[in-house]
């Protein structure tokens, strides 16, 4: 059987309307616009205010937009993979809620947890189903309602994150364009530098865990910054070298949007000029699993068939990796 590459055939997105600006954060914690912009590159982030809506809602909106763009009906989808650290429930999987919401009655669906690398892990997994011929149409979604696990009295984390979702449809490619290679890494973080202490089976919710604010993100920012800067730059260079790509061969870097300084260091290491780097952290902050598909959505009209694109991410776990693809639309 001839193996076919998986191609991204459409992109969709969802962003809540509400903009939480640096100015508004100045009234909530001891911080200021200048510190946030110079240390992170963030000016504002979107927040899903509706208390009756969460990750599944945003993921379904993004998925439906991708299907509409491709002219594909929901019942044609074989598989839905949703990357998130903010599932609507611990179970059932948020992917199941999306499957029901969009009417993808012939699809099986599951969640994938790899924090900020979640979309890349999910894209690699989805592409394997297409390459093997086991699935013809796969929805890969990155969606996070980060505001649901943020302590808005903790200035070290509340300035960083936002809510949003992005989705891509994967189909078999008829030519050489599509997803070509991936490199993924994991290093179990025994120091818990970036995690949510409670709510899982080790520390189920109690009055004490709530009082301790253990259901919110805790991060050792400096430690994670160091690892992320090295990890994202190393893996991006590795995938270039593995595929004999020189800086001039790369049309775009699509980096996870955690901190502008990490993005800049990655681009420098790859030898790429700024105009080849997708950056929207200023508008959306860190939307965890959604950052990379949100970039693809924002830049989709500037992409040309055959463009060499490197996707790259680092996140909690630790998890990190890069994907090399040729744009196929
Ligand atoms: O996406 C998953 C992976 N996550 C990341 O990649 C995030 C990685 N980490 C980072 O992006 C950065 O470490 C932060 C943006 C979180 C922090 O930036 P930093 O340059 O590492 O700052 P810092 O933690 O070294 O703090 C410097 C100072 C401290 O004050 P002192 O001790 O020097 O007096 C902090 O208390 O800045 C203070 N600070 C703030 N000041 C104003 C920390 N947060 C704030 C704040 N506003 N929001």
Image (cartoon, rainbow, N blue to C red):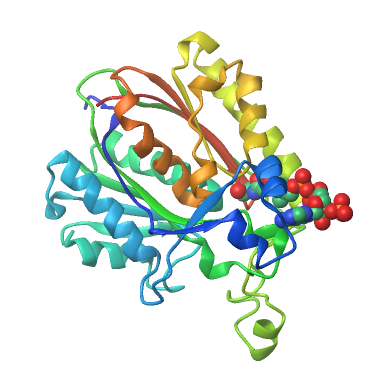
Estimate the x, y position of residue 141 in percent, counting from the top left. Answer: 36, 50
In the image, 148: left or right of 129?
right
Q: Residue at x 71, y 61 (%)?
A: 155
User: Is any part of residue 230 visible from this angle?
Assistant: yes
Vertical comparison of 114 with 243: above or below: below
Position of the C terminus, as image quadrant, is top left
Q: In the depicted view, which residue is nearer to us: 147 or 187?
A: 147
In the image, 51: left or right of 177?
right
Estimate the x, y position of residue 90 in percent, counting from the top left. Answer: 46, 73
Q: Residue at x 64, y 29 (%)?
A: 264
Estimate the x, y position of residue 23 in percent, counting from the top left. Answer: 61, 57
Estimate the x, y position of residue 157 in percent, counting from the top left. Answer: 67, 59
Quarter residue 56 falls in = bottom left
Q: In the depicted view, which residue is nearer to us: 250 or 22?
A: 22
Q: Residue at x 34, y 43 (%)?
A: 126
Q: In the depicted view, which residue is nearer to us: 252 or 181?
A: 252
Position of the N terminus, as image quadrant, is top left
In the image, 185: left or right of 87?
right
In the image, 100: left or right of 38?
left
Vertical comparison of 276 with 146: above or below: above
Q: In the depicted view, which residue is nearer to us: 24 or 321?
A: 24
């Amino acid at each position: 059987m001839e193996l076919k590459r998986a191609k991204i055939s459409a992109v969709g997105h969802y962003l809540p309307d509400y903009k939480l600006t640096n100015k508004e954060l100045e009234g909530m914690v001891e911080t200021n616009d200048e510190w946030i912009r110079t240390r992170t590159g963030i000016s504002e982030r979107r927040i899903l205010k509706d208390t009756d809506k969460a990750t599944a809602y945003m993921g379904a909106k993004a998925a439906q937009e991708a299907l509409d763009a491709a002219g594909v009906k929901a019942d044609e989808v074989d598989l839905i993979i949703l990357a998130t650290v903010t599932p609507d429930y611990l179970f059932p999987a948020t992917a199941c809620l999306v499957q029901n919401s969009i009417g993808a009655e012939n699809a099986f669906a599951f969640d994938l947890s790899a924090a900020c690398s979640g979309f890349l892990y999910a894209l690699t997994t989805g592409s394997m189903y297409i390459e093997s011929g086991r699935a013809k149409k796969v929805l890969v979604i990155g969606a996070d309602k980060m505001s649901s696990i943020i302590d808005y009295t903790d200035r070290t984390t509340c300035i960083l994150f936002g809510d949003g979702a992005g989705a891509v449809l994967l189909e078999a490619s008829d030519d050489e364009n599509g997803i070509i290679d991936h490199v993924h890494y994991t290093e179990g973080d025994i120091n818990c530098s970036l995690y949510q202490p409670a709510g899982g089976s080790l520390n189920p919710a109690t009055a004490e865990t709530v009082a301790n604010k253990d259901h919110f993100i805790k991060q050792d920012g400096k430690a994670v910054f160091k690892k992320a800067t090295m990890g994202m730059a190393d893996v991006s260079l590795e995938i270039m070298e593995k595929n004999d790509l020189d800086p001039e061969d790369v049309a775009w870097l699509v980096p996870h949007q955690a901190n502008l300084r990490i993005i800049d260091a990655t681009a420098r290491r790859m030898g790429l000029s700024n105009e080849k780097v997708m950056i929207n952290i200023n508008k959306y902050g860190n939307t965890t699993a959604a950052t990379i598909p949100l970039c693809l959505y924002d830049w989709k009209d500037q992409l040309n068939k055959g463009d060499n694109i490197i996707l790259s991410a680092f996140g909690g776990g630790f998890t990190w990796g890069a994907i090399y693809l040729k744009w196929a639309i």
